[in-house]
Image (tube, helix red, strand yellow):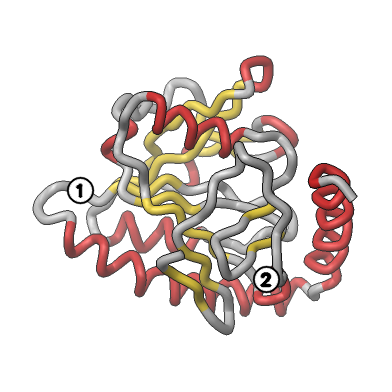
């Protein structure tokens, strides 16, 4: 089976698995995973010194782990939160600073996004960490996204510009951990994944 076919098959299976988790259980597991993520990010925030800690977060959609507690933590500790706005015809994400979840509106695919009037983050090197969405992850930093390639393109953009890459963290349900995620050469690996039960770091 080709890598492409393996990815397609795994996406179908993981979407079904994640959707089968009852909403109340997903909420509880999200809270648990977010607590673990915050503990990890707290150490990074302490290393940031006097400058504001800057977090790039996706906005949770459908059955994804709800990472809004991590966003709220960042605001509460005086940090900055940026979220992406998808520019579909360019396969591009522009990053915009938001002050609260109220700054979001319906965007591409029904996912909440910032308005274009929200201040843009121009210097990607200011990002300390990014919360990376996905369907499946493994203990080696492998990640299966949704097939759009937006996050892969974003990481390539950081590298092409010679920018410091943010710490790439996935917040997921334990059922999303698989033995091995099929990867292409252009796929990036994450730095850590935390679930409601365990975590993998320093791949």
Q: On the rendered structure, is 13 left or right of 126?
A: right
Secondary element type, mark 1: loop
View extreme (top): residue: 89
Q: Looking at the image, is mark 2 or mark 1 earlier in the sequence?
A: 1
Residue 47: image quadrant is: bottom left
Q: Which mark is residue 52?
A: 1
Q: Position of residue 44 (x, y in %)?
A: 26, 62
Q: Residue at x 45, y 59 (%)?
A: 191
Numbered circles on residues, count: 2
Q: On the rendered structure, is 194 left or right of 130?
A: right
188, above or below 17, in the image: above
Residue in front for this viewpoint, 163 or 57: 163
Q: Identify residue for label 2.
A: 177
Tell me whether circle 2 and circle 1 mark residues in contact (CB < 8 Å): no
Q: CA distance from mark 2 to mark 1?
A: 32 Å
Tell which tag, 2 or 1, sits nearer the viewer. Answer: 2
């Amino acid at each position: 089976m080709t890598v492409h076919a393996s990815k397609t098959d795994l996406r179908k299976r993981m979407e079904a698995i994640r959707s089968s988790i009852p909403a109340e259980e997903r909420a509880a597991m999200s809270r648990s995973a977010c607590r673990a993520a915050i503990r990890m990010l707290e150490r990074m925030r302490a290393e940031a010194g006097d400058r504001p800690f800057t977090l790039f977060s996706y906005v949770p959609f459908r059955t994804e782990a709800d990472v809004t507690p991590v966003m709220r933590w960042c605001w509460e500790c005086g940090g900055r939160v940026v979220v992406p706005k998808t520019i579909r015809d360019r396969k591009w994400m522009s990053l915009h600073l938001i002050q609260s979840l109220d700054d979001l509106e319906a965007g591409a695919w029904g996912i909440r996004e910032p308005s274009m009037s929200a201040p843009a983050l121009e210097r990607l090197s200011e990002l300390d960490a990014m919360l990376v969405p996905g369907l499946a992850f493994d203990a080696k930093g492998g990640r299966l996204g949704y097939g759009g390639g937006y996050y892969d393109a974003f990481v390539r953009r950081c590298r092409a510009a010679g920018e410091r890459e943010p710490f790439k963290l996935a917040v997921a349900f334990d059922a999303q951990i698989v033995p091995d995620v099929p990867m292409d050469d252009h796929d990036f690996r994450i730095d850590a994944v935390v679930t409601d039960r365990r975590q993998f770091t320093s791949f």
